[in-house]
Amino acid sequence: PLQLPVGALFESRLLLTDAHGAPLALAANYGAALRVSHSSVLSASLKRTADGGALLSFRAKATGCASVGASVIEPGGKSAPFRDMALVCVSRGALSGAAPLLLQPGGLVHLSADSEALRPNEGAALLTSLRLRCLSGDA
C-alpha cells in the first residue's frame, strides 16, 4: 500500500488504459467518482483536467488505513467497467512501523520516487531519516 505521513498532501493523475496498456482520455461527457472507506484517515478529491484527464488529491488526516476506489461514470450515471482500488496507510512517519531492512555490504537503499510528491505543509520540507546499524561488528 501507499504510505503517507500524517498531514501529507499527495497528488496523482488518474491514468486510464485499455486492455493493452495504451492510455485513454476521459471523454468530456463521462465523469469520474472517487470513494474513500475511512474519511477520518484520508480525505480525497478529484478534479478534471483540460487534457481529458483527472487529478487525484489526497490529504493524510490521521493514522490508519483506508481503501480508495476510483471509477468512470458513463453519461446517464451508469458506472463504466473502468475502476480500480488501492490501499493507502497513514502513519506518524511514512516508513514508521516498517520491518527492519537487511542489507549486504555494498548494498544500496532506494527511496521511493513518490516521496517527491509528499508535502506535509506548503513550503515545508519532507524530513527523512535512515538509521544504519552493523550487526556483525565487521564494518
Image (cartoon, helix red, strand yellow):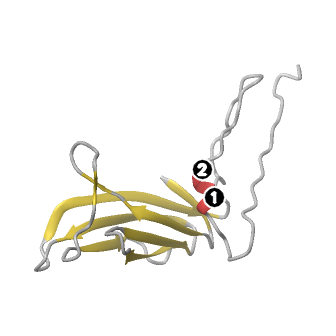
x and y, in percent, of residue 64 in the image:
52, 65
Query: Which amino acid does the dot numbered 1 rest on?
Result: Glu
Residue at 47 percent of width and 63 percent of height: 12
Mark 1 vs 2: CB contact within 8 A:
yes
Gap between marks 1 and 2, in whole Å? 6 Å
Query: Which amino acid does the dot numbered 2 rest on?
Result: Ala
Residue at 62 percent of width and 64 percent of height: 118
Give the numbered dot on residue 116: 1
Of 58 and 139, nearer the camera is 58
Q: Secondary structure at mark 1?
A: helix
x and y, in percent, of residue 8 in the image:
61, 70
Taking the image as shown, residue 105 lies to the left or right of residue 75, namely right
Give the quadrant of residue 131. Answer: top right
Of the 4 image quadrants, the one containing the C terminus is top right
Of 11 and 44, nearer the camera is 11
Residue 133 higher or lower than 9, as above or below = above
Of 104 and 20, nearer the camera is 20
Residue at 31 percent of width and 66 percent of height: 70
Residue at 13 percent of width and 77 percent of height: 75
Badge 2, how many Cα within 10 Å: few under 14, some, many 20+?
few
Q: Secondary structure at mark 2?
A: helix
**Which residue is disc 2 drawn over?**
113
